[in-house]
Image (cartoon, grey):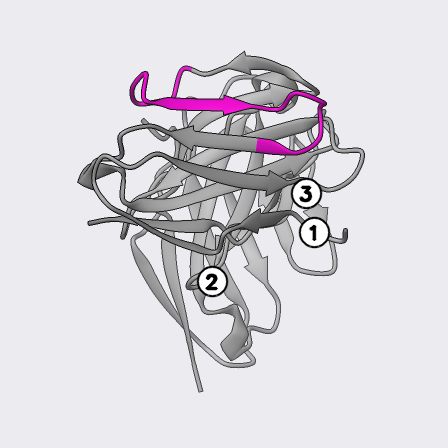
Amino acid sequence: GAGVSQSPRYKVAKRGQDVALRCDPISGHVSLFWYQQALGQGPEFLTYFQNEAQLDKSGLPSDRFFAERPEGSVSTLKIQRTQQEDSAVYLCASSLGGARGYTFGSGTRLTVV
Amino acid sequence: DAKTTQPPSMDCAEGRAANLPCNHSTISGNEYVYWYRQIHSQGPQYIIHGLKNNETNEMASLIITEDRKSSTLILPHATLRDTAVYYCIVSKGGSQGNLIFGKGTKLSVKP
């Protein structure tokens, strides 16, 4: 597609529930990033993929967070046993690599109740 | 922590040039200066980036000082749709290109 697509756009989860957030990057984009954005704050880095390889997961806040990109295209961010502090907008970005700018999706707003 | 310093907010009159400053005094030689903006309820949008030379595209111009310790993003004719939070980021790009966002500058374009 023309842009980065994320689904669902909104997700409400009960505390303790597992959730899966999907990102469809721009076709051919090698690099894929996940960010978390709390209300009123700038986005914070979670993890980075180059093709199917997860090269950096230093930003994942706990072992409840897991991301994958098995075929080097679509990526899924999974959060197990969600907690209220996980409430945020989760942003996905992709890039052709190098010094090029990233294209961000519109994000998934997760609300844990 | 973000390696840039930006004013928290700025106002600009519609049709006038908006000049957004950014300090990045600790930038290293292989780091680029990137600008993104985020309109309410949308993901960040890439605007422009540069290494040493000034850059211009259809959206904006980027002026980088000779010592590279500061830069200015210029929107030549601001419109109401340019109201957004503008982020100045320094990054090496590529596989080391994790972007570290600060708080940015909230630009309000007023009629």
| Residue marked by disc 1 | A3
Mark 3 and mark 1: Cα distance apart in space = 28 Å
In contact (CB < 8 Å): disc 3 and disc 1: no
| Residue marked by disc 2 | B39
Q: Amino acid at mark 2?
A: Ile
- Position in image of residue B32 (x %, y %): 59, 29
Q: Are marks 1 and 2 on the same chain?
A: no
Q: Secondary structure at mark 1?
A: loop
- Position in image of residue B41 (x %, y %): 43, 62
Whether residue B70 appears in this view of the structure is: no
Q: Which image quadrant is residue B102 in? A: top left
- Position in image of residue B5 (x %, y %): 35, 39
Q: Amino acid at mark 3?
A: Asn
> Magenta stretch: residue A29 in it?
no
Q: Are marks 3 and 2 on the same chain?
A: yes
- A106 left or right, relative to B11: right
| Residue marked by disc 3 | B54
Q: Nearer the viewer, residue A37 or A15?
A: A15
Name the residue located 56 percent from the left edge and 48 percent from the top edge. Answer: A6
Specify the segment rendered in magenta. Answer: A58-75
Task: Give me the chain letter of mark 3.
Answer: B
Which circle's residue, 3 or 2, is located before the other in the chain?
Answer: 2
Name the residue located 32 percent from the left edge and 45 percent from the top edge. Answer: A88
Query: Looking at the image, is A71 positioned above or below residue B105?
Result: above
